Image: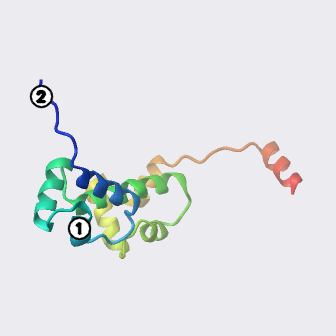
Amino acid sequence: MSSKPAARPGIASVRALIDQHYTRELTIAYLAKTSGLSPFHFIRAFRKEVGSTPHQYQRARRIERAKELLVTTPLPVTEICDRIGFQSLGSFSSLFRRLTGETPAGYRAERRKDVYIPACFVRMYRADR
């Protein structure tokens, strides 16, 4: 019975670091130092364990967060782009489309459902103010 080898502590901590700070620019040198590996060995080890490079992994985290924000908030796409760490709306939109097959606005329109709030609840809320 062969089981998958345990995750390297250095790679696991870097993965957690990327998950926590996905909006920041994290250099390979910084991530490698955090893992305790040389930059070239770090990239190989990360790809072997995670299935993608650190850069690809961070981009995927950003796009996941963008998808969540598009569906759950009324924030403009440009603000979402800024919040998830992209410097350019064009690069965000093209990456989003490449990974999801849809534009950010199209993704939102297809999935966002407006919630119906009965008028009586609106009146009750306004009466409390």
Residue count near mark 1 (Cα–Cα under 10 Å), binned few <14, some 14–19, many ≥20: some
Which amino acid is tagged 1?
Lys
Q: In this rendering, which labeled residue sits more in front, label 1 or label 2?
A: 1
Taking depth in this image into account, of 89 and 23 the one nearest to the observer is 23
- Secondary structure beneath disc 2? loop
The answer to whether residue 101 is seen in the rendering is: no
Say if 23 sits above or below 61 in the image: below
Asked if disc 1 and disc 2 are in contact, CB closer than 8 Å, the reply is no
* 35, 52: nearer the viewer: 35
Q: Quadrant of residue 106?
A: bottom left
Where is mark 2, residue-wise? 2
Say left or right for 53 vs 16.
left
Q: Quadrant of the C terminus?
A: bottom right
- The amino acid pointed to by label 2 is Ser
Image color mode: rainbow
From the top left corner, tell me how far across and down residue 52 is, in percent: 19, 54
